[in-house]
Image (spheres, rainbow, N blue to C red):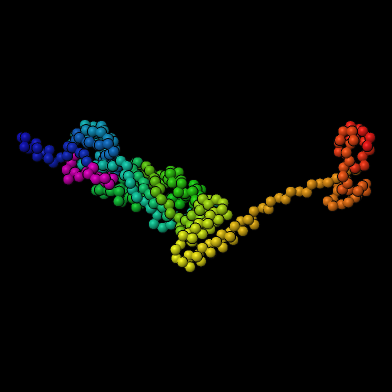
Amino acid sequence: MGIFTNIIRGQFIDVIEWKDPSQNIMVYRYDCGGKEIMMGAQLTVRESQVAIMVNEGQLADVFGPGRYELQTQNMPILTALKAWKYGFNSPFKAEVYFINTRQFIDQKWGTSNPVMMRDAEFGMVRLLAHGIYSFAVADPKVFLKEVFGTNGLYTTEYITGQIKRTIVSGLSDAIAQSKIPALDLAANYDELGSYALSILSPRVASLGLKLTSFVIENITVPEEVEKAMDQRTSMGVVGDLGKYTQFQAAAAMRDAANNQNGAAGMGAGFGAAAMMSQVMNQSMQQQPAAAQPAAAQTYCPKCGAPLTAGVKFCPQCGAKQGQSASVCPQCGQETAPGAKFCPQCGARL
């Protein structure tokens, strides 16, 4: 009797579980081997897994992480699909799919063709970019309906191509809407990556997926734009262009003086000296001329009228100019020529 019972039990499945042996399997269909599932069988769903019952191609009950004893009470959808009556206790056939809900990290993405960007300073710019992203299954039922179907095994290789194309098409929109200048892109990778993630996430949600992270590692601009950026950077580092040119000329003279190649070194030295002289002359010509001190204004000692330099008589009163001042005999105060009284003590002159 015991042997007969074991044979009967061997024709049915009483334990259902899946241990993920790989890092890239997204969906695994449990291999029933043509056997039926016993009512009361043990279903084990591990963390980062979801199990879905499928009856003749129709999605039925969904089981999250945990251990379940399969009964009609915890399989309401499957019970309705199979029209089981209350108390049904016979083995049944159904497909069990395990969906991996953990994050699939370190997925590479990159632009095979340049992405066009309109920059306010450089106009239309072609950009090449690459980085990494992570994704996970957000809605297992939507993923099975829209992407997976009824395959026995589904890995990340089947979906990453679609995600990469979605990323590249959405990246140009993200760069344009962020309005970050081409010169500032390298300093804003984190901000641009976060903004791109908010734009790209809704585009993969229709597949039952979600982007958990999006990282931009590098953005490459065309060679001509790189040269323009280097020139801008050099100008900012140089500062005073005149002083920098003088410094370069002086360095050239020093190098020529240290050159031991005979006449060639002397010729280079003379050439550098001539260049230095020319640069210094140009620099001096560009400097504003020093302001000459203004000539002192003179006035007529008799009537106080302003006088032009070199005149001999006042144009207002006709007084002769250039006479030496008089001195008061009482106080010794110097007085103007022709004065009748001392302006200091009032003595008559």
- What number of labels is visible? 0
Give me the residue at 59% from left, 61% from top: 278
Q: Residue at point 15% right, 40% down?
A: 12
78, above or below 279, in the image:
above
Q: Residue furthest front?
A: 329
Q: Is residue 262 left or right of residue 149?
A: right
Image coordinates for residue 57, horizontal then vertical, percent: 27, 46
The majority secondary structure of the magenta stretch comes to loop
From the viewer's perspective, tell me whether residue 278 is left or right of residue 13. Answer: right
Magenta segment: 20-37
Residue at figure coordinates x 44%, y 63% from the top left: 260
Q: Nearer the viewer, residue 349 or 24?
A: 349
Residue 190 occupies which quadrant of the picture? top left
In the displayed structure, does residue 295 sit left or right of residue 42?
right
Residue 138 falls within the magenta-colored stretch: no
Q: Image quadrant of residue 81? A: top left
Side of 239 relative to 338 (left or right): left
Residue at figure coordinates x 30%, y 51% from the top left: 157
Examine the image and state in which quarter residue 82 appears.
Answer: top left
* Quadrant the N terminus occupies: top left
Quadrant containing the C terminus is top right
Nearer to us in this view, 132 or 44: 132
* Viewer-closest of 321 and 110: 321
Which x, y percent locates residue 247?
53, 54
Q: Is 27 contained in the magenta span? A: yes
